[in-house]
Image: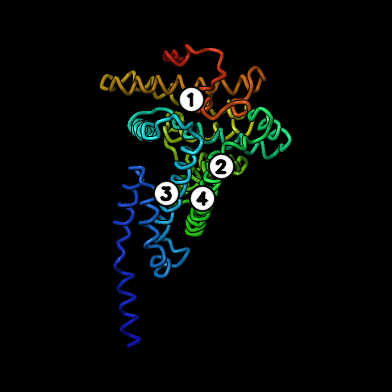
Amino acid sequence: MSDQRENERSSGLDDINIPELIKEAEHLISQDEFEEAVNLIQENLAQLIEKYGELGLENAPVFFLYGKALYQSAKHKALFNVLPDDVDQSAVSSSSSSSRTAENNLLVDVSTTKVLSVDRFVKHKQEANPEAAAATEADADGKGTVDSDNEDEGDDKKTGDDDEEEEEEEFQLAWEWLETVRVIYEKDGEEKNWEMMVEVLTLIGQLGLEVGNGQQSVKDLTRALEIIEAHSPSPSEDRAIYEARVRLGISLRYNDLYDEAAAQFKLASDILVARFEAKQKNPSSVPELLSSLKEAITDIRQKLEEVIALANQNIPDPSDPVETPSDSSSSSSSSSSSSSSSSQPAPVAA
């Protein structure tokens, strides 16, 4: 009888088709159905761990998607929690999906740290200086007191606190599973798993930026860039290196390391210019691609100008608490002194 139960259990473990599970989870994530992806993988986690072990190499791709889905789910919820009430959330979600599609097909801005990251960095700065935070809240409330007649406000705050706690739990779970994936690939050999190591380090680095762990974010994104550079056949025109430099530059910028951020944005700009010039010489180049490259060059140069100005203390840091999340959500800094730079593509220098 015990042998029969053992055979049934083993048969159940063999029923999991990992490639199909990965394919379905990737599809759900691509459709922004993050909770569905989380639930799908959760249903199979226990059996996968029982069959291959907690650090089994076979489980690494599934664990990675689990961590990714948790991270995206938490970020998605946090984004909508900081949006003003009058913003159409469905429109924001649709805009986010279309932007990601454009990033995949052409070469445009890879930044995913706009409203959410600025808001979270404001929060962490306030936590580091409670007196300033209290003063800021008092100014916002007029007298720093809550209107006793507005009972709904207290209920909204309680709901908001619950939502934030749920987000933090998901961010923490995402970090734990992604760290497990990192350990698995390092144990198996970083060199032969370098492409997945880049994906894991990049996601962990972005997660660190979202939750305010800026120093670790810089460390992880720097390591990801180093691995890509070590395996790139053409570093001066490599799109992957461009994207890695932009992500690292954003992390450095939010850590107030403006000179270092400027250096990364400058190198990223050089890659785009080299790609543009190479494509421009090719008669078969698609006009839309050239236009997208021009747009990306304009965007990265704008980021470069912003951090240079911040380094020179010419403009206030947009992540300062005096800024509101809605002000910081635009793709360019609200404190930029020129609005015309974003309306026309910047000239491509040699």
Q: Position of residue 321 (x, y in %)?
A: 63, 29
Query: What is the three-letter code of the residue carrying label 3?
Result: Ala
| Residue 228 in sight here | yes
Query: What is the three-letter code of the residue carrying label 1?
Result: Ser
Query: Mark 2 or mark 4, which is nearer to you?
Result: 2
Query: Mark 1 or mark 4, which is nearer to you?
Result: 4
Q: Position of residue 213 (x, y in %)?
A: 60, 43
Quick one: label 1 or label 4, which is nearer the N terminus? 4
Q: Which residue is mark 1?
A: 330
Cα distance in 3D space between marks 1 and 4: 26 Å
Cα distance in 3D space between marks 2 and 1: 26 Å
- Residue ID at (51%, 39%): 225
Asked if 1 appears above or below 46 in the picture, the reply is below
Tell whether label 1 touches label 2 (CB within 8 Å): no
The quarter of the displayed image where residue 279 is located? top left
Where, quadrant-wise, is the N terminus in this rendering? bottom left
The quarter of the displayed image where residue 310 is located? top right
| Residue 104 in sight here | no
Q: Determine crowd level at label 4: few under 14, some 14-19, many 20+ residues with C-alpha closer than 10 A.
A: some
Compared across the picture, whether 132 is left or right of 17 comes to right
Q: Which residue is mark 4?
A: 166
Query: What is the three-letter code of the residue carrying label 2?
Result: Lys
Q: Which residue is mark 3?
A: 69
Tell whether label 4 touches label 2 (CB within 8 Å): no
Quick one: label 2 or label 4, which is nearer the N terminus? 2
